[in-house]
Amino acid sequence: MRVVHTIAEARAVRRALPGTWGFVPTMGYLHEGHLSLVRRARAENDRVAVSIFVNPTQFGPHEDYARYPRDLERDLRLLEPLGVDLVFVPSVEEMYPPGFQTWVIVEEVSRPLEGASRPGHFRGVATVVAKLFNILQPDRAYFGQKDAQQTVVIRRMVQDLNIPVEIVICPTVREPDGLAMSSRNTYLNPEERRAATVLFRALQAAKARYEAGERDAEGLREAMREVIRAEPLARIDYVSVADPETLQELERVEGPALLSLAVYIGTTRLIDNIMLP
Ligand SMILES: Nc1ncnc2c1ncn2[C@@H]1O[C@H](COP(=O)(O)OP(=O)(O)OP(=O)(O)O)[C@@H](O)[C@H]1O
Ligand SMILES: CC(C)(CO)[C@@H](O)C(=O)[O-]
Ligand code: BAL
């Protein structure tokens, strides 16, 4: 497993090792969700690259960039047994040298949901992912369904900019009590950790109402809100029942629907989603 910090070294390793390349972009502090992407990439490609980069341009000025958890040694220990060929760990200066001024903006699908709550977030995500694709030139890239809007934004970018990479979306890995794995779960104290199951419980409540015949999208949103309001440590940022491709809010659920939500547990903001039917 080669661990490199510069773009020149990453390109050299990529060029030296023949075969198909799978790529898993991450912000590190790896958990089983990330590792599931790496295993899938390992199974489907001759070579696997992982990037670890806490990308400052996708964080708002009042977000958690500075305190985002980082532990490179632990991450490398977790990756070593998985058969990863290349780990790319650039510095901020390597990715954004002085004079940097070019951005990738995916317009419509970046606007609602996470984009509305985190202005500029998807500009940062799309730009860094485009750069990583250009540097590593993977055949396939692996993303988690947990960040559902991110998968829509990246797919759109790849299609619109003719980037020759296949985007593979992998299922959300959960804790036994349903909480979606996230590096941000480490911010939760024990009481908040118990309360954090409210995201998955809210999604399940809406799903149950759908299965009981509810097709009014507002009825499904209300089912989520009821569960979250009953949890004193939780505060709703948004609940959504949207078209999975356009991400526009639905009035009626006649076909596939993306149920998603963002909830503050104390000061920690968590997201989750499921697809219907
Ligand atoms: N529970 C999960 N199951 C499957 N994939 C996941 C899970 N959590 C994160 N991923 C995916 O791993 C990739 C890297 O995500 P990232 O490093 O931001 O992890 P994270 O734990 O989601 O962090 P955050 O705390 O920022 O939400 C993304 O494609 C993301 O969707
Ligand atoms: C795709 C990504 C690594 C870009 O910084 C990030 O948004 C993430 O971890 O999901
Ligand atoms: N979408 C995962 C990375 C982030 O929250 O900034």
Image: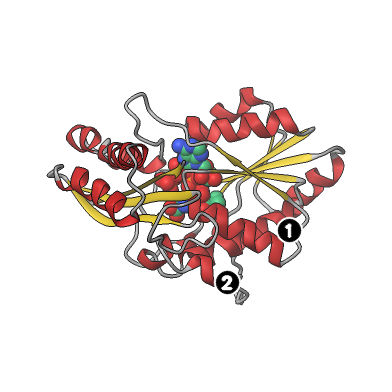
Residue displayed at 50% across by 64% down: 122
Front-most of 53 and 115? 115
> What crowding class fits label 1: few (fewer than 14 Cα within 10 Å), some (14-19), or many (20 or more)?
few
Q: Which residue shows up at 40% across the image and 49% down it?
A: 259
In the rendered view, tell whether residue 118 sits above or below residue 75. Answer: below
Element type where label 2 sits in the image: loop
User: x and y percent of residue 168 in the render?
Assistant: 65, 43
Q: Nearer the viewer, residue 6 or 53?
A: 53
Q: Is residue 76 visible?
A: no
Whichever of labels 1 and 2 marks the residue nearer the N terminus, that label is: 2
Of 171 and 220, the residue lying toward us? 220
The residue positioned 28% from the left and 38% from the top of the image is: 205
Provide the secondary structure element on which disc 1 rests.
helix
Q: Which residue is mark 2?
A: 105
Give the class, few, some or many, for how many residues have Cα within 10 Å of label 2's Cα (few <14, many ≥20): some
List x then y, in percent, for residue 163.
Answer: 75, 60
Residue 203: name its quadrant: top left
Q: Which residue position holds label 1?
A: 134
**Image colouring:** secondary structure
Amino acid, disc 2: Ile
Whether residue 171 is visible, yes or no, is: yes
* Label 1 to label 2: alpha-carbon separation: 16 Å
Q: Position of residue 153 (x, y in %)?
A: 57, 60
Q: State which quarter of the image contains the N terminus.
A: top right
